[in-house]
Image (spheres, helix red, strand yellow):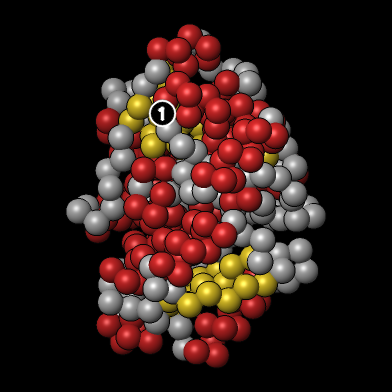
């Protein structure tokens, strides 16, 4: 069977994103290398437009809509970063956006989404089905729905972050990627295994939200209760069907980190790397710092986002 997303799709997405998305920097730290016992290369998607890798997939998907569909508008559902990404992509393409967001999404993410011109509708993530609500809203208004990860163009766009990291480093032995719905790691593993077939790809989830780890171990998608974790961008109940079909073939392992380990990683990044990282963006770094992933040689880690308000950032570190 033909793969749902290929390296050619990711390279095509990279061409579309050239001059639109940032080619984010790769940061090094000798202190980090010494602590981890390997050479670590940090891909800073917290410095991407909208403050997260999500802009890559959102723009790649939205840019392929017809002029007629762009005139009608775009819909999305998201815990925050995809919301901002679709809102900005729609604005860049002269379209409009309606975004379904959980009521408990950090206010900073809601404000940023509205700031890009999107209309916001909220729901209770613990009782509502965002897919059903989002699909109903899109159908009612005739909008094109761009989901946060269950879409080949979204996955291909996300894979451009790993492609850039691999292009900007001589070689990597291991790639570490945060996992929520699975879109980032699906695109990343597709790019990584195509460019460097022997590379080891390890995903990282919050310990309270280990749906992908359980699913890979079971060989089928496993649903869990809505996770309660500070890593709100990774509070997934079940892996995506499309993303899981990719990840079960290409992802080598999943590591789990606690909220306290995430806080420690956020503090390390702020103090030593001078980077502000949101909890979901810090899980890969947390896994390395806590020894949850045994590594050697050259290791790449994707920092997926940095959307956290100063108040929330200070509150999280004070609680650790």
Determine if residue 305 is in view. Answer: yes
Instruction: Give the image location of residue 114, x and y in percent.
Output: 45, 69
Q: Is residue 41 above or below residue 312?
A: above
Q: Is residue 63 above or below residue 217?
A: below
Task: Tell me what residue is drawn at x 54 percent, y 35 percent.
Answer: 282
Task: Tell me what residue is drawn at x 31 percent, y 40 percent.
Answer: 24
Instruction: Give the image location of residue 285, x and y in percent.
Output: 53, 29
Q: Which residue, given by chain and number where applicable, does mark 1 sit on?
A: 274
Q: Is residue 4 above or below residue 253?
A: below
In the drawing, does residue 181 fall left or right of residue 49? right
Quarter occupied by the C terminus? top right
What SS does tag 1 mark? loop
Viewer-proximal residue among 255 and 20: 20
Instruction: Give the image location of residue 158, x and y in percent.
Output: 41, 50
- Residue at far left of view: 19
Task: Tell me what residue is drawn at x 48 percent, y 49 percent.
Answer: 307
Determine if residue 241 is in view. Answer: no
How many numbered discs, if any?
Answer: 1
Q: Which quadrant would residue 104 be assigned to in this image?
A: bottom right
């Amino acid at each position: 069977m033909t793969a749902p997303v290929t390296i050619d799709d990711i390279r095509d997405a990279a061409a579309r994103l050239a001059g639109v998305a940032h080619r984010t920097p790769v940061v090094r730290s000798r202190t980090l290398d010494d602590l981890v016992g390997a050479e670590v290369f940090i891909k800073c998607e917290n410095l991407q437009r909208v403050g997260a890798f999500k802009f890559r997939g959102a723009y790649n998907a939205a840019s392929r809509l017809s002029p007629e569909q762009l005139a009608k508008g775009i819909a999305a559902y998201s815990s925050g970063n995809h919301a901002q990404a679709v809102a900005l992509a729609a604005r860049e393409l002269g379209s409009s956006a309606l975004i379904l967001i959980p009521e408990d999404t950090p206010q900073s993410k809601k404000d940023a989404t509205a700031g890009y011109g999107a209309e916001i509708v909220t729901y209770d993530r613990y009782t509502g089905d965002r897919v059903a609500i989002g699909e109903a809203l899109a159908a009612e208004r005739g909008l094109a729905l761009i989901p946060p990860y269950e879409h080949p163009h979204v996955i291909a766009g996300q894979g451009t972050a790993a492609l850039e990291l691999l292009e900007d480093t001589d070689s990597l032995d291991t790639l570490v990627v945060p996992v929520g719905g699975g879109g980032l790691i699906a695109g990343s593993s597709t790019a990584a295994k195509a460019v460097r077939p022997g590379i080891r790809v390890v995903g990282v989830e919050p310990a309270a939200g280990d749906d992908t780890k359980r699913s890979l171990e079971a060989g089928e998608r496993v649903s869990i209760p809505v996770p309660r974790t500070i890593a709100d961008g990774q509070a997934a109940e079940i892996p995506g069907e499309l993303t899981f079909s990719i990840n079960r073939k290409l992802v080598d392992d999943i590591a789990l980190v606690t909220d306290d380990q995430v806080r420690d990683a956020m503090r390390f990044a702020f103090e030593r790397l001078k980077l502000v990282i949101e909890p979901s963006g810090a899980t890969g770094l947390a896994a390395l710092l806590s020894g949850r992933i045994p590594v050697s040689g050259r290791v790449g880690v994707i920092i997926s986002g940095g959307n956290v308000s100063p108040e929330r950032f200070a509150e999280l570190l004070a609680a650790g």
